[in-house]
Image (cartoon, rainbow, N blue to C red):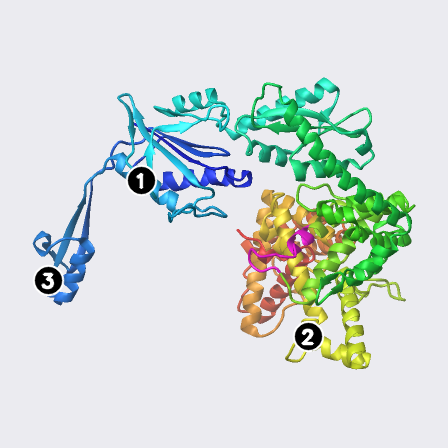
Amino acid sequence: MPDLLIELFSEEIPARMQARAREDLKRLVTEGLVQAGLTYAGAGAFSTPRRLTLTVEDLTAHSPTTREERKGPRLDAPEKALEGFLRSTGLTRDQLDARDDKKGQVWFATITQPGRPAAQIVAEVLEAAIRTFPWPKSMRWGAGSLRWVRPLHSILCILSDEAGAEIVPLTVDGIAAANTTRGHRFMAPDAFPVTGFEDYATKLRRARVMLDAEERASEIRAQAENLAFARGWQIVPDEALLAEVAGLVEWPVPLMGVIEDRFLALPPEVLQTSMKEHQKFFSARNPRTGRIEGFVTVANIETPDDGATILAGNQRVLAARLSDAAFFWENDLREAKSGMTAWAEGLTSVTFHNKLGSQADRIARIAALAREIAPLVGADPDQSERAARLAKLDLRSAMVGEFPELQGTMGRYYALEAGEPEAIADAARDHYAPLGPSDAVLTAPVSVAVALADKIDTLTGFWAIDEKPTGSKDPFALRRAALGVIRLVLENRLELPLVQYAEPTEAGGIQGTKGRLGLLSRAYMRILQEALATKIRARSETLEEALARIEQPRPGPVLISGNREGLVADLLSFLHDRLKVHLRDQGIRHDIIDAVLAQEGNDDLVQVVNRATALNAMLQTEDGKDLTQGLKRAGNILAQAEEKDGVEYSFGADIKFAETDEERALFAALDGAEPAIRHAMASEDFPSAMSAIAALRSPIDAFFEAVQVNTDSQILRRNRLNLLSRIRDAGRQIADFTRIEG
């Protein structure tokens, strides 16, 4: 069985496209071979800046001969039907067989597809792969019609076995397949023949080409760390940069350089970002000083002077880049020390969104909301408001204008230069976090308050103007903002109702859901008030007139879409969807989450998670599984009876009508469990609530085994249905058990 070797040799392929291109080449070719009837033992794909390579091991030499029987029209069918059948099979009438069928005699065709040699199939599959290759960007060159990421120079395509290597006959846009390749562009540019993958990889290495991207990355890491160790430094880890640089060189030669003393006062993030973005340098930190004092650049060639000329040129370019950064830094520091008022004024002319106002408008909303959130997270309200007002001012700085990825990071430096406390400066740096699922979650109270206010304002704002995520599209990163809110709330254990606050009444009771507005509602109302103010100024309306028109919009363009209750409920549902994804990753089933979310208080995410975790633990036990079936059975019987009778059975169960010991035992069990469940839920002791309801398992099972609910006696039937309603209500205190599957 032969092995297949393919190499597509071109001008430099962008590093960011190489990993995907390797997988696409492997997928297109192997799937095409299998569809054509060939099998193989294994395949591997490789890439360098100038080549994509695929090796396929133990490919079958021929595709098998296949026979297919196809049923056609009846013998007495119209001639047109028979002609169409013949065209579809490629046969003639005399090649058909007439056979008996349950509806009479029918034409049958036997189509034989002879096997084909692997070389013929490979040629077809590879040409199709080249012509349809899914590059993110591609180009045409010369007079040809072929599109490739960069001009394609040659195609190596051979089948090799014990007898030798065979060139697959293939020509694509004038490029004929051969058995030759080339080494390093400068150190070994001549063509040489190969006879198989092992020969190919060995000769490439002699020609100064490392074929495997992972090997190049490992070599760069090892040599860079050795160079840094020799100076007593450490390389700042950067896996993304490492993968990119491994895609820029075929023969990596790391070189160590030193940053000039005049630039060492720049923040380390500025040095690292400037070197990474502009020159693809790795940063080297001095652990004794904590500063970035050196760099590693990776050349693609060995030189007689051991890279001295290359390093000197890189030093000159770096000095120019860092001179620009130093200029930005000095100018920004002067503005920071003067209070950053010019930056604050400048944000009034920066539009955040044409329906949500300027960045200054947004900052005002976030600052007000951060002040309200602060006491709920243990933060100082004045510091939280101040931090929110400063957090985005660095967007007007020259440094962030040059390096947008440093927003927040530079804000901390500027806040400290302005004399602000560290808590405020840290909040300016951290308020964007967490940006991804692997980011650490903030714990500093002021930072948490500002980060929550920022994300909640973003979510409510875009919901208010009906700019929600759709399908895979999320241009404003609202899913990320929602997950950020969820992680901040859960990992800091913040019991923050998002829609309504319940607060004590004068009598000491609880108002239920008719309390103060929750965070989502209050954030939305701030946007609403801003919209009202705009409309009042524009149209000289009264507050009542504008509020009525916005809360109950008429046809035509409006700033705020829908009423507050519906909008906030929809946004809460979106947060619940993100919460489901978050909890599923932690092993909690979606139906358990749905059962808990169906209850009141589902806007307190910490309570939702605590309930779901406790319920999930209970359902892992046999008692929990059996109890769930009993609760669901009670609910189903009740639902059927209530639909049939047109009434709700929700009160009136009386033990004096109990006829069996099992009924009386269930009454007694409920009398003990109901207050225990209520007390545990009120004190948020969810494991105790689960233990209390689990105690009902045996009485419920015994009741259903011994008692007929729908008896002929209407008095007994009503009493037993009302008893089932007590079971249902006991379960509803914890979750909607009807939503639990199985």
Question: Where does the image place residue 663, in percent across and percent down from the top left?
Answer: 62, 57
Label 3 to label 1: alpha-carbon separation: 47 Å
Label 2 environment density (alpha carbons within 10 Å; few <14, some 14–19, many ≥20):
some
N-term-proximal mark, 1 vs 2 = 1
Which residue bears the numbered disc 3? 75
Label 3 environment density (alpha carbons within 10 Å; few <14, some 14–19, many ≥20):
some
Identified at 31% across, 31% down, the residue is 59
Query: Total marks drawn?
Result: 3
Look at the image and say whether residue 520 sits in the magenta stretch. Answer: no
Q: Secondary structure at mark 1?
A: strand
Q: Nearer the viewer, residue 387 or 334?
A: 334
| Residue 558 image label | 2
Question: Where does the image place residue 453, in percent across and percent down from the top left?
Answer: 78, 56
Residue type (three-letter) at the residue carrying disc 1: Thr
Label 3 to label 2: alpha-carbon separation: 69 Å
Which residue bears the numbered disc 1? 171
